[in-house]
Image (cartoon, rainbow, N blue to C red):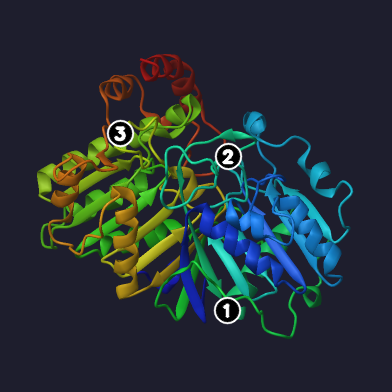
Amino acid sequence: MVSKESLWRQHPVQELGLLVDGDDYYREFYRAALTAQKSILITGWQFDSEVPLLRGKDAEAATAPVALLKFLNHLCETKPDLRIYLLAWDFHLIFAAEREWMQQLVFQWNTNPRLVFQFDASHAEGGCHHQKFVVIDGEVSFLGGIDLAEDRWDDRKHLMPNPLRMSRGKPHKPFHDIQAYLRGRELAASLTELFTARWTRAGGEAIPPEQLTPEAASTYVAQNVMPLSVKLAGLNRTDPNAVPEGEKPCLEILRSHEEAIAGAQQIIYAETQYMSSHLITEALERRMRQAELPKLELVFILNMRGETLKEQAAVGLAQAQNIGRLRKTAEETGHRLGLYYTNPHCHEGEEPERATYIHSKLMIVDDRVMLVGSANLTNRSMGVDSELNLVVDAGASAAAARRTLLAEHTGGPELDLTEGLVAKLDAIAAGEGGPSRLKRHPSPTPGEQTALSLVDPQKLPWDPDHAEPLDDEQHTDFLAGIGRTVRELLG
């Protein structure tokens, strides 16, 4: 279903599983880091020095600091052979209000010299570094959508409210995400190669390989992991500035999604922060219009709307356009299409203040092939930003993962069915059988439809599908359409 040509590397693994939501991932990262002997490599879109990795009873029982920077510094202070490298996207000014100021100084002021922080601005024009992965002692790895940052923590209950879900001293939104756990030295070596190439390209000093991997095996024993029956794991990338230098731009993640969608026979299940990619939408439309192939159950868990006006304009309007196209195609072809958002858990009689924020980037096809990582179903994730995904054939364990994730979103029992799944979910979302956290997605709304009549969002510059400067037509569309579009989105 996914060809070797769409993979960067493929390696055997001893263990592989999913960590669902920040509570499980932060705890497992903390436990794995405690066992580190020689190296911890961490790269992400965003870091926050004070984010607590453990909370509640876990924090009370901790014997080491729980805030990220203090924890990492403690590890260096107590382990004389340990080196820790953090590589962060050198973010655009537009994100300055959301970020910790003077972060490189914060991470290296009065900390151990073997704790090194580096900003990376070596991305394509108009892009960003969006890969989020960790390698510990060249053996234990984590990759996916979760940054070690504020506003990212939640547990699988998604309670409203939750006194542990705090950011900088204030409550923050319910948040759903996924990170993969992997164990295997060959796979970790490829991730280390990717990290060190980016590190030196960003201006960091070369990292000697002998500093990274101890001879002894890691003593870390994973807990809280949703296990997957996988012996061979594939890695693929998006990166117009391919690593190592001299390669052609990497569009492997796009190709693997297109291949998986084209080969689908029963069901496509996806969770994505955004769904603005016109190429993914076209791949779904092509598959639905292949009359000789079986009808599909297509289930998408999305955000109800963009978190900010910036998000609504950048990707929300394109998502609304794509949703409209997919609804029309499914109606014409007879495929079952379900698009949903999900609310947090509330006590009886209470109404949610807002929907749970979906930050995960996951697709499961035919309850077998799983694609998970940092790449959203956006134009830029498929062509401009640096991204990293995992591709595996998980067999029956993929179906089990899909069932438990859907149960998290509905707040009800697991649904052991494929045929008729969308009809069942539509009934659950409508409240048949009692209140449910799952709701049908309202897009495209009347305001979005009006905005779409004024401007084609695929011609706006915020979510490009290739790394090139804007041409005159794009500038004209941007200047002419942005004011009217914003007015419509604001209602």
Local crowd size for mark 2, using a 10 Å CA cut-off: few (<14), some (14–19), many (≥20) = some
* Whether residue 30 is situated above or below residue 345 in the rendered picture: below
Q: Tell me if mark 3 has few (under 14), some (14-19) or many (20+) residues whose alpha carbon lies within 10 angstroms of its own.
A: many
Crowd band around label 1 with a 10 angstrom C-alpha radius: few (<14), some (14–19), many (20+): some
Nearest to viewer (mark 2 / mark 3): 2
In the image, residue 148 lies at what x, y percent?
A: 62, 51
Asked if residue 319 can be seen in this view, the reply is yes
Q: Secondary structure at mark 3?
A: helix
In the image, residue 198 above or below residue 33: above
How far separated are the C-alphas under marks 2 and 3? 34 Å
Q: Position of residue 477 (x, y in %)?
A: 44, 22
Give residue 321's mark.
3
Instruction: Tell me if 31 is positioned left or right of 283 in this view.
Output: right
Q: Earlier in the sequence, mark 2 or mark 3?
A: 2
Q: Amino acid at mark 1?
A: Gly
The quadrant where residue 38 appears: bottom right
Secondary structure type for disc 2 = strand
Which residue type carries mark 2? Met
Q: Residue at x 60, y 44 (%)?
A: 128
Is residue 12 in sight in this rendering? no
Comparing labels 1 and 2, the label whose residue is closer to the camera: 2
- The N terminus sits in image quarter: bottom left
Q: Nearer the viewer, residue 98 or 125?
A: 98
In this view, the residue farthest toward the bottom is 216
Q: Which mark is residue 166?
A: 2
Q: Earlier in the sequence, mark 1 or mark 2?
A: 2
Which amino acid is tagged 3? Answer: Gln
User: Label 1 belongs to which residue?
Assistant: 184
Judge by depth and name the residue closer to the eye, 478 or 72: 72
Image side of residue 76 versus residue 468, left or right: right
